[in-house]
Image (cartoon, rainbow, N blue to C red):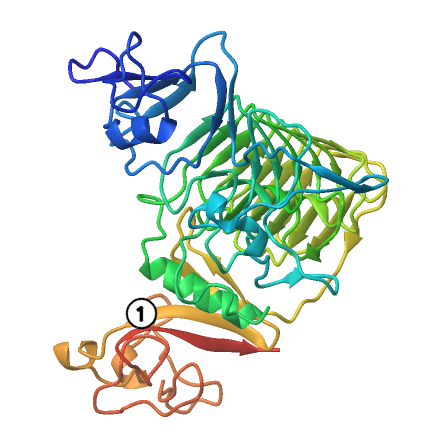
Amino acid sequence: MSLNDGNAVELHVAINGRDTNPGTEAAPLKTIQRAADLAQPGDRVTVHGGVYRERICPPRGGLSEIQMIVYQAAEGEKVIIKGSVIVKDWIKIQDDAWKAVLPNSMFGGFNPFSDLISGDWFLPKNRQHHTGAVYLHGEWLREAATPWAPPTAKQIGVVSALWCKGWIIEDNEISYSKCSGVALGKYGDEWDNTSADTAEGYVSTIHRALSSGWNKATIGSHTVRNNHIHHCEQVGIVGSMGCSFSTVTGNLIHDIHTTCLFGGYETGGIKFHGAIDTIISRNHIYGCGDFSGIWLDWMCQGAQVTCNLMHDNSGSRGDFFLEMQHGPQLVANNLFLSTCSCQIVSKGVAFAHNLFTTPIKHQRFDERLTPFHHPHSTELAGMREGDGWYLAVSQDTSWRGEVNRKLVTTARLGKAIASSLAYDDLDGSELRIATDYFGKKRDEMNPFPGPFEDVTSGSRMINVWVN
């Protein structure tokens, strides 16, 4: 943000303010949301000390790195943002059991105690769970009724950078979330949580995300830096594709998924899908229950995991879990000190100068359909599936008519210059490239360019290798 911009405004928020005030330091606003409604690119929102019990949904972002909208605590003042309210009039039932009866009207349009947790890859453990909770203490960004955040649905955390670019989330304490702490996640649509826990369902999600603007120019490139993230029951930092090209560094992450009242395959200190060219460096991660401290799952091509301190992560995958990666990834200079250091269900990973205290678990085969990308891009280059390899290709049938081609034969190739020999077949007969990659007969009057004769316009996936 540039405070030298003559149009930039600094808006002040204080507990004793009024939302009808102009937002100056002398006449501050009362709620952070009101400041967010007023803030324009280049503005700064300064929040003064106190507890703010509100949900904040900024209606707009900045325009560039020098015209950001900055939300900050006033220097030297402690700001606490909570998603909870204080409940009094508790009645003791017996022993340590207490009861309070609240009218539904108190919750307005959203009652977390009637909002059930569910979704793809969620394990309820034979009981119902809701996003509501009772907290005995708490401070800073905490006590939030967040939903389960699988990669196929809208991902919401205490702090959510939702399908956008360039957020800087730094120097916060984020804790006591029912599910997720920080979400760098996917948008929501009518397909949320309809994938039936299948790889094919997520592949469809990926194609829809590409159509919804998943590219380096518009999505990702966030910075999550120097935060203290703890006591989140699903995951500390989560992201599906929205985390691409981001940097996660200097964070203290601990006590994640520790009560294990529910389970699922989206838990851990950090759980990312599609973290292309993402840096995870110099974080201290410990005390994470099932599954892992850092879990990179699908499409983390180009990711670098370096200089992290990890210990006392008791999950079955330990400190670090790499799932369905095709490479390249770099894992270097890390301290993996838990009783289970690392599990790899991937290929193309370079490990250098790490400290492991236990053997690495390596699973050599997984039959699921998984994509890989062009270098430093979200654009699909192909798919790897249990029954073979798939190529993502775009073709245009108009190529057939633009130029009249002839079949490649011995007569057309002529002779090699140095040897003056013809390009004939191995038995001396005429050479004819009369079939394509799949052995399909080519159009001898006008063969289609490239390895495939059977062409349809547009993008498609072609199975080019069968296991």
Residue 18 visible (yes or no): yes
Q: Is residue 214 above or below residue 35?
A: below
Q: Position of residue 254 (x, y in %)?
A: 70, 33
Which residue occupies 69% across, 31% down? 136
Q: Nearer the viewer, residue 218 or 115?
A: 115
466 on left or right of 98 = left
Q: Position of residue 65 (x, y in %)?
A: 31, 26
Q: Is residue 371 above or below residue 356?
A: below
Which residue occupies 63% across, 53% down? 266
Q: Position of residue 30 (x, y in %)?
A: 36, 22
Residue 276 visible (yes or no): no
Q: Nearer the viewer, residue 324 or 102?
A: 102
Q: Pointer 1: residues within 10 angstroms few (<14), some, or many (20+)?
A: few
Q: Which residue is mark 1?
A: 394
Look at the image and tell me in which quarter the N terminus lies. Answer: top left
Where disc 1 sits, the SS reads: strand
Q: Position of residue 165 (x, y in %)?
A: 36, 39
99 on left or right of 406 = right
State which quadrant residue 123 falls in: bottom right
Q: Nearer the viewer, residue 396 or 385?
A: 385
Q: Is residue 377 above or below residue 32?
A: below
Look at the image and tell me in which quarter the C terminus lies. Answer: bottom right
